[in-house]
Image: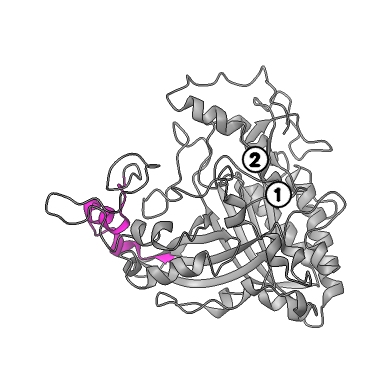
Amino acid sequence: MSKRTTNPKAPASRTKGPDAATNDAARHAPGATVPVEAPGGVSRRRLLGGAGAAGAAGLVLGAAGGAAGYAASRPEEAEALTTLGSTAAMFHGKHQPGITTPLQACGHLVAFDLVAGAGRAQAVTLMRRWSALAEELMSGRPAATGDTGIALDAGPSSLTVTFGFGRTFFARTGLQKHLPAGLDPLPPFSSDHLDAERSGGDLWVQIGADDALVAFHALRAVQKEAASLARVRWQMNGFNRSPGATGRPMTTRNLMGQVDGTNNPKPTDADFDARIRVQPSAAGPDGAHAWLVGGSYAVVRRIRMLLDDWEKLPVAQQEKVIGRRKKDGAPLSGGTETTAPDLDKAGPDGSLVIPANAHARISSPEKNGGATMLRRPFSYHDGIADDGTPDAGLLFICWQADPFRGFVPVQRKLDRGDALSPFIRHEAGAVFAVPPGAVEGEYVGQRLLEA
């Protein structure tokens, strides 16, 4: 990991509180944001490193395998806004960025279908183009050709571009032999109202950044590079709280006002890779799926929140639905946000403190045979209907080594009696196999496409 450097122009840090030791350790964990020299080459940000940039440039080592934010919040003390654009993520590495990278403020999800007649050769061309583009943009440089200028003067802003393949991609490219079992169709669930036109897709691109113009610039560039090779199937826009918006680093909240992302698995956990990354044992006896080892599966669900109904509930009732306090995310059994819920604790009347149908209870690994997912969502809002109903909710993205051991068992359990179910509706969904990162000289997916 790059050594930490000090910028004399950077503002003085705040006085450290009781969590300082934890935060200091998090800063030096694999994947943490650490200030380093600005990326080489011509930067989009003309003043980066000069008088117009008060903070040191940073590097988010998401591609190297970890993020101290655990895809929920940034553990370091809030940065001054002048340093927001200077953090950059590595494109090349063992793992793709955008998985364990700390949550960004802006996100775009877009699925593509290869055009009629396009096959493996065209897919190779497209992935070469996209990989080269992602490397440039994530370094803070403009697109090599045809740059729109949308992000001129902005730094990298923690931009990440992540690529995945859907089930239909393998038949279209003649790679059926390499289709992994994790892309088998998911079973139906009672809360599903899935729109086929906003589900599935041959290819998937996840874009995240801490600046809206930088994120849109990447989205537009990805679409332009697809050109005559692939067309957009669906596209969704999301957002999170901006880094530095709170007095201290905190887990983000969703549009229901609930702390969302507590107890996510951490890259420092001994079993993190086994739960989140595809293991060598999944390569198969003939190595047909070796291309995915070190990668992951992303389950994507557009979950509409029925906010008018939810907001009618008193806070105390909302807390019983979730099983956690709204104010700080602590379990109703007591403690802090990170305290393990005591699922057996009863109140004076003998009833369970965390109700039997509370979301936190039903979705807990303890109640699902240890099933674990790395949740890394974005909120979304797509307008207000004539009757005043908001089209808003969660772009739920979860990462796991196997969807049928991660997402599916948990969702099945939720389907049978989750108190939150009456307040949400799954309106679109997809599953993508996300290959490992590309090392220097490679493009993403090369080990599959050139198998």
Q: Position of residue 290 (x, y in %)?
A: 76, 65
Q: Residues within 10 Å of mark 2 (few under 14, many from 20)?
A: many
Quadrant location of residue 117? bottom right
Mark identifier at residue 348: none
Q: Position of residue 47 (x, y in %)?
A: 73, 30
Q: Is 307 one of the magenta-colored residues?
A: yes
Residue 292 in magenta? no
> Please, what is the three-letter code of the amino acid marked with disc 1?
Ile
Which residue shows up at 36% across the image and 62% down it?
A: 362
Rendered image: mark on residue 31: 2
Q: Which residues are magenta?
A: 304-326
Task: Give the tally of numbered discs.
Answer: 2
Which SS class for mark 2?
loop
Can you name the residue that lies furthest to the left here?
349
Instruction: Kindly identify which residue carries mark 1.
Output: 150
Density class for disc 1 (Cα within 10 Å; few <14, some 14-19, many ≥20) is: some
- Mark 1 element type: loop
What x and y, as percent, mark residue 286? 79, 72
